[in-house]
Amino acid sequence: MLGILSAGIAPGLALLSYFYLKDEYESEPVFVVLRTFMFGALLVFPIMFIQHVLDTENIIKSGFIDAFLASSLLEEFFKWFILFYAIYQHVEFDEPFDGIVYGVAVSLGFATVENIFYLIANGIEHAMARALLPVSSHALFGVIMGFYIGKAKFTEGKKAKWVIVSLTLPFILHGSYDYILISQENWLYIILPFMIFLWWFGLRKVKVARILTMNHKKKQYSTQNSFHS
């Protein structure tokens, strides 16, 4: 059991640490990041309950509905809800890159508990595949969601547009990911290039967020200097 717990938790913590350390300018308080991670972990239970109801009531009629409604929309909406209503106005969310840190934290909290449950049910031999696919994909959906939440908060005007994109884009990518796994017979040949694209896209957002944060810091510094002069 200890081995399963370790294998279930390790990928999430490793990826969270990786993206946390990408924040070069002002690291977020570990307590706030871990609390966001725990919010994501707790989301597993209401989501599993709703998915169980959808399944038992035979509401899911196709792989497309399963991928985009029962999985993607439910999971991404709940993660987005936590990010927007619990983190967006938080005093520690004070630069664009912070959105990525908190987006990854809430996503990996969810992915870690989901991963533990899966390994308990199916065996530790799936740990490597789970780390490379579901856990990594959740982290990258969190990067993308957090990037646009950060863009919404620190861009003047059109904030609503970026808030909508912060939910819509992860929803589409997550649904596409699940639909490939559910519906494609030779899913491995499709999911590998999809994951390469997802990593490229996510890391590109990390790079852009760091530039936006640097510019935000310069603007703050300039404003402070003009105020004191």
Image (cartoon, rainbow, N blue to C red):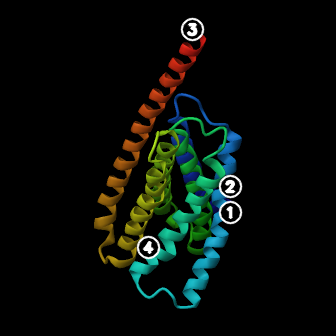
The image quarter containing residue 170 is bottom left
Residue 24 at x, y percent in the picture? 52, 29
Which residue extends farthest top? 229
Of mark 1 and mark 4, the one earlier in the sequence is 1
* C-alpha distance separating marks 1 and 2: 6 Å
* C-alpha distance separating marks 3 and 1: 49 Å
* C-alpha distance separating marks 4 and 2: 25 Å
Instruction: Identify residue for label 1.
Output: 42
Instruction: Identify residue for label 3.
Output: 229
Looking at the rendered structure, the kind of residue marked 4 is Phe
Question: Residue at the location (54% across, 14% down)?
Answer: 226
Element at label 2: helix
Q: What's the mark number on residue 219?
A: none
Q: Is residue 42 above or below residue 146?
A: below
Instruction: Identify residue for label 4.
Output: 68
Instruction: Say whether marks 3 and 1 touch (CB < 8 Å).
Output: no
Element at label 3: loop
Query: In this rendering, which labeled residue sits more in front, label 3 or label 1?
Result: 3
**Local crowd at mark 3 within 10 Å, few (<14), some, or many (≥20)?**
few
Instruction: Identify residue for label 2.
Output: 38
